[in-house]
Amino acid sequence: MLPDLWPQYGLTIVTPRLELRLPREEELATLAQLAGIGVHRPDERPFLTPWTDGGPGDRARFVLQGHWSRLGAWSAAAWQLGLGVFRHGDPLGMVTLRARDFRIVREVTTSAWLGVEHQGKGYGTEARVGLLTLAFDHLDARAALTEVFQDNHASQGVSRKLGYEHDGISVDARGDEVLVSDRLRLMRETWTRQTRPVIRVVGMAACRPMFGL
């Protein structure tokens, strides 16, 4: 069985409405097609890597290659856990939890995309809470980080609502553009003071060595 060789395939995060888990190949193809349809309005450019600038096929292939790359490059010293977001078995998008030297640093970074038709329904917040539950309650993270463009009000709102605080800015180039992002940090102490929905994490014990724990 695949989970015996790659235990992350047995890892599932269950929130009140969603399941977060590694997609199987046909599910991955459906997620790629969902990204091809669109993950933001045409007048938005919410990602530093301009992976949504191409056509539907370009976006779909980016999702496929990114997922395979994360799996293939995995090591306990530097890992990226890319999970499909599912509701009643239907894919809504993907979320990623990543870290480098986690055993020592104990910090994670999150990122996400949802199909445009699934936005504005609270799924992004719920999926982020699921990821953070894994990070803080099961991996014993000290902090969770994210970077958000200053004009990305939806993502800013999700982070602020979850207790992230300003942690400086990042300045990057995208082509000829200068882009300023807010660095946001959620500390473990803030997370533990919050009231959250019941979230189950299944299959974590077998995965701990893969995370360097």
Image: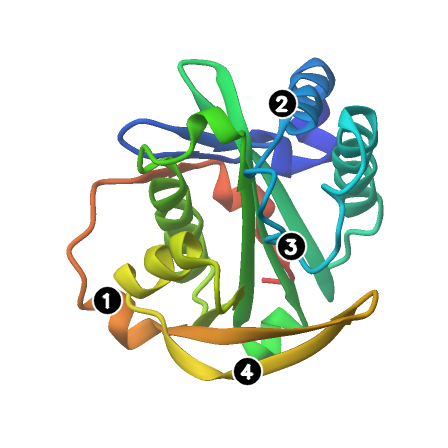
Residue visible at 53% across and 57% down in the picture: 110
Quarter holding the C terminus is bottom right
Residue that mark 1 sits on: 192
- Mark 4 — residue? 169
Label 4 sits on what residue type? Answer: Ile
Q: Is residue 139 visible?
A: yes
Which of the two discs, 1 and 4, sits closer to the camera?
Answer: 4
Furthest toward the bottom, the residue is 168
Q: Which residue is mark 2?
A: 34
Of badges 2 and 1, the one in the foreground is: 2
Residue 85 visible: no
Q: Tag 1: Cα neighbours inside 10 Å, few (<14), some, or many (≥20)?
A: few
Local SS, label 3? loop
**Decide: marks 1, 4 in contact (CB < 8 A)?**
no
Which callout, 1 or 4, points at the residue further toward the start of the chain?
4
Residue 47 x, y percent position in the rendering: 65, 54
Mark 2 surroundings within 10 Å by alpha-carbon count, few (fewer than 14), some (14 through 19), many (20 or more) = many
Q: Measured along the vertical axis of the image, is residue 28 above or below residue 113?
A: above
Give the residue at mark 3.
47
Identify which residue is drawn at 48% across, 63% down.
151
Q: Mark 4: few, some, or many residues within 10 Å (few <14, many ≥20)?
A: some
Q: Earlier in the sequence, mark 3 or mark 2?
A: 2
